[in-house]
Amino acid sequence: MKKFADNKHVVQKLLLSQPIDIPVFHDVALRLQQMMNDHSYKIEEAIILVHQDTALASEMLRYANSTYNSGKTPITTIKNAIVRLGSQQIVNLAFTASMANNKSDNHIINSYLRKLWQHCHAVAITSSWLAVQIKHDNDILDLDPDEVYLAGLLHSIGKLYLLKSMDNLVAAGILQADEAIIDQILEELTIPQGVKVMRHWNIPDVYANSIERHRTDAWIGETNNHLVASVRLSCKIHHCIEQGIEATEVSGIVNDELLFLDIDDVSNVYEMMKAVA
């Protein structure tokens, strides 16, 4: 059995030859997204679709009550969730529940999957919260906090695809997990593979575009700049918290995003991220 460390380029070639339709999303989440894209979203059809997988439905209700419904009357049925939250939030819940359940029998890859989920979930919640504040303070009409939530959730989807691809190769006995090479692979291939995954599954262009602009210095474009800035800011702050960097030292790291979003004090965003991370 080869180790990843034997030849990084061989590993990259193997990963890039994997089918792009490796299931990183639950079919229910994809079908709900498609229904919304086609403007064919009907409550009755959505309820039937979600109930096809009772485990996913249960997870969606759990996240509905923890993420969207704190302090209110509990949401106890999918119908109640759809009526109260609306179509975009239901799609968000389906993707959230779908991504939360990715696991591996390999303890190294599983640890990466758990860390990735914690990061994406924290970025999604903080990005959405930040979008609410920005929209309220600056009256930015084209900024949708629910759309920002999903952009935050999906910003590192390329990592999930790569980890699942690696997991398949490890399970087949072709490769052995090696943390140093996993880190290199994720650093180099996350963005292009994330864009490919988005486009393969016909996820709306706003999310692929956000991924493309996530790490580049030239990230300000013609549209969706506040969405991209919110996700970039939240992602960077979460990485700072993971590295033990205090709020007083964060501003220089996220200066471009702060300037664009017209945020003078990053401490509120920092504390929000700490609360959900």
Image (tube, rainbow, N blue to C red):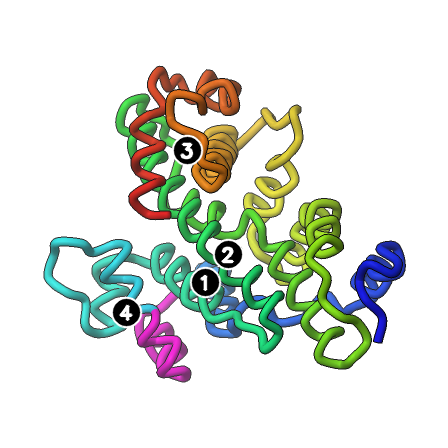
Q: Mark 4 against mark 2, which lies toward the viewer?
A: 2
Q: Secondary structure at mark 4?
A: helix
Amino acid type at mark 4: Leu
Q: CA distance from mark 2 to mark 1?
A: 17 Å
Q: Residue at x 53, y 52 (%)?
A: 154
Q: Mark 2 against mark 3, which lies toward the viewer?
A: 2
| Labels 4 and 2: the sequence-earlier one | 4
Mark 1, residue position? 95
Can residue 228 be seen here? yes
Image location (x, y in percent) of residue 88: 38, 55
Amino acid type at mark 2: Lys
Q: Residue 142 — which label? A: 3
Q: Which residues are magenta?
A: 41-59
Q: Residues within 10 Å of mark 1 (few under 14, many from 20)?
A: many
Q: CA distance from mark 1 to mark 3?
A: 22 Å
Q: Characterize the magenta stretch by its predominant secondary structure.
A: helix
Q: CA distance from mark 2 to mark 3?
A: 32 Å
| Labels 2 and 1: the sequence-earlier one | 1
Q: CA distance from mark 4 to mark 1?
A: 13 Å
Image location (x, y in percent) of residue 22: 67, 71
Q: Quadrant of residue 142?
A: top left
Q: Residue 61 — which label? A: 4
Q: Nearer the viewer, residue 6 or 171?
A: 6
Q: Secondary structure at mark 3?
A: loop
Residue contact between numbered discs 4 and 2, judged by CB atoms under 8 Å: no
Q: Secondary structure at mark 2?
A: helix
Mark 2, residue position? 115
Image location (x, y in percent) of residue 252: 50, 18
Q: Residue at x 81, y 76 (%)?
A: 174
Q: Residue at x 39, y 17 (%)?
A: 262
Q: CA distance from mark 4 to mark 3?
A: 28 Å
Residue contact between numbered discs 2 and 1, judged by CB atoms under 8 Å: no
